[in-house]
Image (tube, helix red, strand yellow):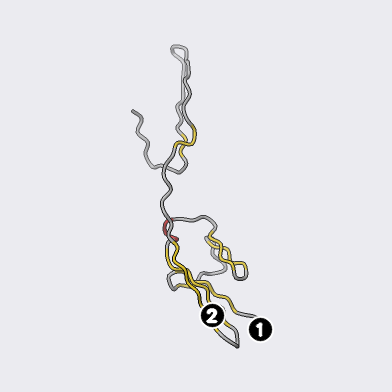
C-alpha cells in the first residue's frame, strides 16, 4: 500500500511549499544550508498496515572566511585612480584596510 510521507524538523512539519526545502517522495533536500538548519530531522511513513519513523541529528558548522582572490602588484601613474577589491568566500559586514 502507498505510504503517506511526512518530514519534520525539531518536531515541526516541513511544508512541501517551503522555499528552503525541496521534498521529492522520500527525499528531503535542503536547498542552501544555514546554521539555523541544525536540528533533528525525522521522516514518518504511514499506511494502513504500519507506521515507520526515523530521525537523524544534523549539525551545520560555520564556513571559515577565506580570501577568494589574492592581490597582485600594480603600478599606477601619479595622480591616477586605483580601486582595491578583496573578494571573500562568504559575505562580511565590515572590512578594515590596514
Image spot of residue 59 (x, y percent): 42, 60
- Quarter of the figure with residue 21: bottom right
Q: Nearer the viewer, residue 68 or 92?
A: 68
Residue 85 in the image: state x and y as whole percent: 46, 30
The single residue placed furthest to the top in the displayed view is 78
- Dot 1 surroundings within 10 Å: few (below 14), some, or many (20 or more)? few
- Locate residue 24 relative to residue 61 in the image: left or right: right
> Any mark on residue 28, and which?
none
| Picture residue at 33% right of the left edge, 28% below the top | 98
- The residue identified by callout 1 is 1
Where's the N terminus, which quadrant?
bottom right
Q: 85 or 66: nearer the eye?
A: 66
Q: CA distance from mark 1 to mark 2?
A: 14 Å
Q: Residue at x 44, y 68 (%)?
A: 40
Under circle 2, the secondary element is strand
Dots 1 and 2: beta carbons under 8 Å?
no
x and y percentages locating residue 60 in the rendered image: 43, 57
Q: Does residue 67 lie above or below 78 as drawn?
A: below
- For the point 46% across and 27% down, the residue is 71
Q: Is residue 17 left or right of residue 73?
A: right
In this figure, which residue is indicated by the disc labeled 2? Answer: 52
Q: Earlier in the sequence, mark 1 or mark 2?
A: 1
Task: Estimate the x, y position of residue 41 in percent, counting from the top left.
Answer: 47, 68
Dot 1: element: loop
Name the residue at the bottom extreme: 48
Count of numbered marks: 2
Q: Residues within 10 Å of mark 2 (few under 14, many from 20)?
A: few
The answer to whether 67 is drawn above or below residue 34 in the figure is above
Occupied quadrant, residue 94: top left
Amino acid at each position: 500500500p502507498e505510504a503517506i510521507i511526512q518530514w519534520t524538523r525539531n518536531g515541526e512539519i516541513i511544508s512541501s511549499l517551503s522555499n528552503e526545502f525541496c521534498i521529492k517522495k522520500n527525499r528531503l533536500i535542503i536547498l542552501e544550508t544555514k546554521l539555523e538548519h541544525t536540528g533533528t530531522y525525522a521522516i514518518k511513513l504511514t499506511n494502513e498496515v504500519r507506521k515507520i519513523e526515523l530521525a537523524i541529528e544534523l549539525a551545520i558548522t560555520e564556513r571559515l572566511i577565506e580570501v577568494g582572490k589574492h592581490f597582485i602588484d600594480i603600478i599606477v601613474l601619479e595622480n591616477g585612480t586605483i580601486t582595491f577589491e578583496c573578494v571573500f568566500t562568504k559575505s562580511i559586514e565590515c572590512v578594515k584596510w590596514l
